[in-house]
């Protein structure tokens, strides 16, 4: 394990979905195995089925901000504790006549800074895409196709199309780890500049 530059005590997540909470657990396990992860039911401020990249991003941002506020108010961490709010939002977007999946993860800090990552883009198979293009949500569509199974809270569309080679928790977890990594690595440019200045004096 690399030397830790930042300790992290709390991750407040804007969802009670067990898949999203597991994703954060996976994203933090290596560096912060003792972290406290708490989920909160929040209003994403967007439609239940975000239909553009921008709408999906705004949903993740709203979740992260609300989660941080609720977490700080309810958990009352000590004054020096490092706490982050995280929002995870999945949506779809159209590319020509195709429907594609997209996922955004947003990290917010107590200082008001925001870090974001996006990924998990893949073409949604036509049998799933067509009902969504007609106005339905992906979760109910998948549930209907798979005999009522709650796909949204289990393996998700990515699990379906990959036969669980990639799970929804892994899908979200990789993007969450990237967003957390951008927070963790913040200030790298200042360190680089300082190293450059020191090198010039040698």
Image: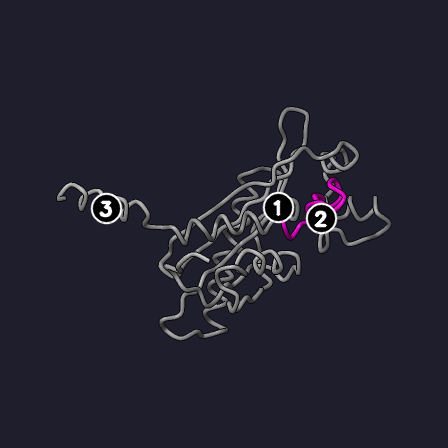
Callout 2 environment at 10 Å: few (<14), some (14 to 19), or many (20+)?
Answer: many
Identify the residue shown where x is 22% and y is 47%. Answer: 194
Q: CA distance from mark 2 to mark 3?
A: 45 Å
> Any mark on residue 195, and which?
3
At horizontal 43% and vertical 56% (from top left) the residue drawn is: 2
Residue 141, quarter of the rendered image:
top right
Give percent across and percent down for residue 124: 70, 35
User: Is residue 26 located in the magenta-colored stretch of the structure?
Assistant: no
Q: Of discs 1 and 3, which sits in the foreground? A: 3
State whether residue 47 is above or below residue 131.
below
Q: In the rendered structure, find residue 90 and report the number of the disc placed on it.
A: 1
Which residue, as the protein is rendered here, is positioned at the far top? 96
Could you tell me which residue is drawn at 68 percent across and 25 percent down? 97
First of labels 1, 3 by sequence position: 1
Percent of width and height locating residue 112: 37, 56
Question: Disc 2 or 3, which lies upstream in sequence?
Answer: 2
Give the residue at mark 2: 156
Q: Which residues are magenta?
A: 156-171
Question: Element type at marker 3?
Answer: helix
- State yes or no: residue 158 in magenta: yes
Q: Identify the image quadrant of residue 127.
A: top right
Disc 2 + disc 1, Cβ < 8 Å:
yes
């Amino acid at each position: 394990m690399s030397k830790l530059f930042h300790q992290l005590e709390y991750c407040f997540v804007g969802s009670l979905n067990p898949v999203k909470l597991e994703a954060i657990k996976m994203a933090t396990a290596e560096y912060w195995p003792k972290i406290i992860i708490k989920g909160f039911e929040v209003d994403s401020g967007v439609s239940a089925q975000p239909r553009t990249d921008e709408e999906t991003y705004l949903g993740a941002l709203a979740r992260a901000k609300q989660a941080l506020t609720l977490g700080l108010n309810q958990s009352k961490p000590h004054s020096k504790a490092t706490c982050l709010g995280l929002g995870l939002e999945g949506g779809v977007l159209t590319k020509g006549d195709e429907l594609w999946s997209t996922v955004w993860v947003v990290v917010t800090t107590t200082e008001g800074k925001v870090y974001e990552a996006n990924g998990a883009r893949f073409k949604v198979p036509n049998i799933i895409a067509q009902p969504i293009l007609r106005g339905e949500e992906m979760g109910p569509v998948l549930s209907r196709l798979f005999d009522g199974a709650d796909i949204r809270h289990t393996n998700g569309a990515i699990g379906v199309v990959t036969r669980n080679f990639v799970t929804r928790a892994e899908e979200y977890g990789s993007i969450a780890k990237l967003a957390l990594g951008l927070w963790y690595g913040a200030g790298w440019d200042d360190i680089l500049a300082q190293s450059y200045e020191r090198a010039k004096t040698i």
